Amino acid sequence: MSTDDVARTAPAISLRGVAKSFDGGTLALRGCDVDIEVGEFVAIVGASGSGKSTLLNILGTLDRPDRGEYLLLGRRLGELPERELCRLRKETFSFVFQESHVLREETAARNAALGLRVQGVPRRERPGAVTRGLARVGLGHRWSTRGRHLSGGERQRLAFARAASTGAPILLADEPTGNLDSRNSEELIHQLKQLNAEGTTVVVVTHDERVAAAARRRIRIEDGEVREDDPHSTPTRPVPNLRTDPLSRGPGRARWDPLDDVSDAVSSATSRIVRSAMVVLAFALGVAGLTASVGLSESAAAQVSQRISAAALDEITVTAAGDPTTQHEFFARTAQIRDDLNRLEGVRGSGVSATLSSQECSVTVLPPQSVPGQSRFRGELVAADGAWLGLQGAVESVPGAVAAFDAATVRGRPAVLVGEGAARTLGLDRVTAGQQLWIDGRRVEVVGAIRSAARAPGLGDAVVVNFASLAGRAGLSPVLLVRTEDGYPAALRSAIPLVLNPAQPGAYTVALTADLRSLHRGVSADLADLVRVVSWALLLFSGLGAASAMYLAVQSRSAEIALRRALGASRPSIARIFLLEGAVLGLGGGLLGSALGVAAVVVYCLLQRWTAVLSPELVWWGTGIGAGVGIAAAVYPALAAATGSIAERIRG
Ligand code: ADP
Ligand code: MG
């Protein structure tokens, strides 16, 4: 006999000595022999816990027996690989369970088409089948209604339509009326009978006497054994739809349609909107951090190098090498030195400054002796002359402040200029002449305020005193700033020590700001590295958060996964759904994050008056990273979804 001859005469399904036990030692089936002929309508009945569902799952290849044989149209399934089993399920079986497992957020039409999508029925052929399927269960008018808006009875009819639309030759149902009232039960029984009359082999597990009565044959299970089988019922008519060997059938017209997967992923992401929003937000924060850190460090680096380049062109600093005595002499001589330097060709001007930390010197608003507990100024304290302020491009809040500062200096009177930022931290609402500060316990007159300084950022947050305010103070390290014509610093560098002290040129250190450039680059690169490490860590954490959210989603979609697998979806195709969903969410998060990151850079640079440095690739880069992290975060959830037993998932 050829395989086709066997297929023509063999029962649809034969089980021989099938046994199944579960962890914990339950022997659910103990050696069952069951033959189901093509075209039959069989009811499997028995007490609860007798093994009916276990038998049905094995019949539907949702579970494998521990012992015994399964023959489909006379062909042994044996150890058929999982991939082949999927194809078999897809082409041979459809299922209706007690729970309808209708996807709540999907329309009735999409729900009804689920089997067709898994089968790979071409897109244009689906609407016809779906319309017929919905019409036969009386849901023709409900095709656009979401699952959650359907009544329990309608959902179960939809589940029936989903099964019937696939055209599978064998329908397996487990307590399909278990949750239905009598009117809906009658309706479903009618549908089962009609489907059987059209040629579909129907096997239904049931408690419901009316369902059992509708079947032509009854198999009673007790304690995992077939106790009663009415062998007289045979199908009343020849049935055409399961007479070719399902194992030797070619791949047929089924084709994987990537658009289906994408639409599944998008629909799943958009139907669980709050969860998706959280996941997208997690990705967005991670990507925004990264984009902002890259953008900011590039903008900052550009800013620093711009500033240093400008300084390199026209700036020299002179300091005295060595001990406090030399420093003191140097300071005492600065007036003379400045005169000497200002006469050199290429020198535009010079000025003196010295910086003190707030530890070295106390600045208070009230006399420290009479108000001991008051807070001290914590910012930068700069001692300078008016020339230095001019060279740094200091901008006064009210014109005349620097002139007043100079005038006081000439007369040897202590004077202080307050940066606007420093004034705020000191609690001086408005700086007016006649106010005073206490510097190291000495009263110093406030002569005005400074808004900013083009060449000395940070001066707006500092307190600037003249040297008269610090008279008698030891340990100052004055720095002489020399502003030159553009391009002169290098030439002047060797000339200056000789001018200052021909006998001992080594007494002074002359530095070009250009020397700082490489140092500064190094520092900002280190800083950028640090920020980047932190950002990647942030991205990692947001990915982990998203992964756990997706894992929970997999858990909550267990029934849907089981349903898809029962309809014949392969493990890889299940994994693909979750990976794609991860990619979709990651992509969304990446786009949003890039936008947020870019916005942060732009706003920060505006506030700092920097030029924002943003390469257009940054957005693509951020989006790509978002998608990548999305996929990575979905790997474990996808694996969890793809593995695991179908029967277990159906049980819930
Ligand atoms: P029925 O559908 O007739 O109510 P089942 O086939 O669901 O019965 O279960 C038969 C027996 O096997 C029961 O004792 C049940 O507890 C046990 N059983 C079924 N599935 C599992 C499982 N996955 N793990 C452990 N025990 C199970
Ligand atoms: Mg059961």
Image (spheres, rainbow, N blue to C red):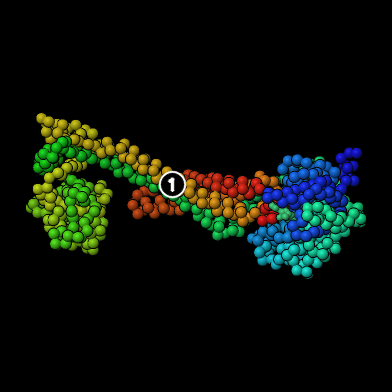
- Asked whether, in this view, residue 354 is left or right of residue 616, the answer is left
Q: Can residue 141 be seen in this view?
A: no
Q: In terms of image quarters, where does ligand 1 lie?
A: bottom right
Measured as percent of width and height from the top left, residue 360 is found at 18, 49
| Residue at image coords 73%, 41% | 81
Residue 475's image quarter?
top left
Which residue occupies the extreme front position in the image?
A: 25
Label 1 crowd bin: few (<14), some (14–19), many (20+), radius 10 Å: many
Which residue occupies the extreme left position in the image?
A: 411
Q: Which of 158 and 183 is in front in this view?
A: 183
Q: For the residue marked with disc 1, what is the amino acid?
A: Ser
Q: Nearer the viewer, residue 412 or 107?
A: 107
Quadrant location of the C terminus in the rendered image: bottom right
- Asked whether, in this view, residue 539 is left or right of residue 427, the answer is right
Measured as percent of width and height from the top left, residue 351 is found at 17, 44
Quadrant location of the N terminus in the rendered image: top right
Q: Can residue 11 be seen in this view?
A: yes
Q: Nearer the viewer, residue 435 or 326?
A: 326
Residue 251's image quarter?
top right
| Residue at image coords 70%, 67% | 151
Q: In this figure, which residue is indicated by the disc labeled 1? A: 535
- Asked whether, in this view, residue 117 is left or right of residue 439, the answer is right
| Residue at image coords 25%, 58% | 425
How many dots with numbers? Answer: 1
| Residue at image coords 68%, 64% | 145
Measured as percent of width and height from the top left, residue 526 is found at 36, 40
Measured as percent of width and height from the top left, residue 238 is found at 91, 52
Disc 1 C-beta below 8 A from ligand 1? no
Identify the secondary structure beneath mark 1.
Answer: helix
